[in-house]
Structure formats: C-alpha cells, structure tokens
Image (cartoon, rainbow, N blue to C red):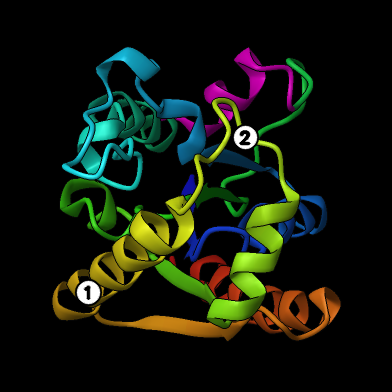
C-alpha cells in the first residue's frame, strides 16, 4: 500500500479550500484534512496588545490532534477511508493503488512535525489588495473587528511566510489570481507524476 501526502497552504482567502476540493474530486482514493477544523475554542485564543485575537498562530490550533489524524491515515489509509464511508467496505485491495491525503491550511508548513510528513507542497499567493477585498466579503464567526486585517492578519501572514521559507524547501508557489482550472492543472499534473513514480516502485 503506497501513500502520498499533498500539502496545500497559502494566504487567507487565497484559494486553498477550492484547490483542495477540486484536487480531491479528480484523485481516486483521496481525502482532505483541513487545518481550520482544529482551531481551539475562542476563549482559549489569546489577545495581543491591540486587542486582536491571535488566530494566525500555531498556539490557536490543536496541532497535536491534527498530527494524530494525519498519522492515523498514514498507518492505514484504506481503513481510514472505509471508516468514514469514503470507499465501500467490500472494495478489493490493490497493492499498486496509491492513496492520497490532501492536508490543507494556512500554517501546515510551519508546524515541523506535520511538515515532515508532507511529500508535495503547494503554496497559494495573492496580492494584499485582492486578499483584503476577499477577506472583507466573507463572514467569520466571530467577525473581524475594525482594523483587524491591516493590524494583524496581513502582518502575521508575512511573518509566518518568512518563517516557512526559512525552514522549508521544495515548495511550489502558485499564483492564486490565475483561473482556478489553470492552477488545478499544474498541481494535478505534478501529483499524477508523483503517483506514477510510486506505482512504478517495487
């Protein structure tokens, strides 16, 4: 049984979830583990000196639980998919089959234990202006307070991005302003090549 872990990271509202879903739809025996599912309860997220909730840090996330979930998939991806109803329980096994896990989130490459499990890394980028416009059009719970994007979100993105670049190599940077089908074609083609290489291994 062969496995491939694909990481889809990037700026807030950069298209991570869309790309991950489209990739999942095209890849047989794949599933997604999204980082946003592991945020701590709001009462446990600290506040900075400006009164802004510090959501854009690893401390705001249950990264230990996310890591356990990824490790559970890696141990037996077939069983993992069956238990969640993603493949039929009686489907025949194939030793040549490659199971793909898509790990999606804004800080997946900044958490070393998780990053070390990722085989292919993709990072979506968009400009400040586009990011701010997209962020303002979305509804968050709790909602962003006034000044939150400029006072916290964008500076933290730049900080986290620099930390990621200094500690992680082999990242494919993607232009999130390009048509989603074009971005998908690049990633899908690359992932398919990785799958073919795994299938060719004895």
**Relative to residue 54, is residue 4 drawn left or right?**
right
For label 1, count other residues whose C-alpha is less than 10 Å away and answer few (under 14), some (14-19) or many (20+): some
What's the residue at 19%, 40% (across, down)? Answer: 48
Q: Badge 1 is on which residue?
A: 168
Q: Quadrant of the C terminus?
A: bottom left
Give the Cα distance between marks 2 and 1.
Answer: 30 Å
Task: Indicate yes or no whether the magenta region holds residue 84.
Answer: yes
**Magenta stretch: dominant SS?**
helix
**Relative to residue 5, is residue 178 drawn left or right?**
right
Residue 142 locus on image (x, y percent): 54, 26
Q: Circles 2 and 1: CB distance less than 8 Å?
A: no
Task: Indicate yes or no whether the magenta region holds residue 38.
Answer: no
Along the line of sight, the residue nearer the viewer: 61 or 101? 61
Instruction: Specify the label residue 16 is tagged with.
Output: none
Q: Could one spot residue 6 in this view of the protein? A: no
- For numbered disc 1, what is the local secondary structure? loop
Q: Quadrant of residue 179?
A: bottom right
Q: Is residue 141 above or below residue 126?
A: above
Boundaries of the magenta span: 76-86
Residue 13 locus on image (x, y percent): 62, 59
Residue 138 locus on image (x, y percent): 72, 46
Along the line of sight, the residue nearer the viewer: 50 or 68? 50
Q: Badge 2 is on which residue?
A: 140
Q: Is residue 1 above or below residue 91?
A: below
Residue 118 locus on image (x, y percent): 35, 58
What's the residue at 25%, 81% (across, down)? Answer: 169
- For numbered disc 2, what is the local secondary structure? loop
Along the line of sight, the residue nearer the viewer: 114 or 194? 114
């Amino acid at each position: 049984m062969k496995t491939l872990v694909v990481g889809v990271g990037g700026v807030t509202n950069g298209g991570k979830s869309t790309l991950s879903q489209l990739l999942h739809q095209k890849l047989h025996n794949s599933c997604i583990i999204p980082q946003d599912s592991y945020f701590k309860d709001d009462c446990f997220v600290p506040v900075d000196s400006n009164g802004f909730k510090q959501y854009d840090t690893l401390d705001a996330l249950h990264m230990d639980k996310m890591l356990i979930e990824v490790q559970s998939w890696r141990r037996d991806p077939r069983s993992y998919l069956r238990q969640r109803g993603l493949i039929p329980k009686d489907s025949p096994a194939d030793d040549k089959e490659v199971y793909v896990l898509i790990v999606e989130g804004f800080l997946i490459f900044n958490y070393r234990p998780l990053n070390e499990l990722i085989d292919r890394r993709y990072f979506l980028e968009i400009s400040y202006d586009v990011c701010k416009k997209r962020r303002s059009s979305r509804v968050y719970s709790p909602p962003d307070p006034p000044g939150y994007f400029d006072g916290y979100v964008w500076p933290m993105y730049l900080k986290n991005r620099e930390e990621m670049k200094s500690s992680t190599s082999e990242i494919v940077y993607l232009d999130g302003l390009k048509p989603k089908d074009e971005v998908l074609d690049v990633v899908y083609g690359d992932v398919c090549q990785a799958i073919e290489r795994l299938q060719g291994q004895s």
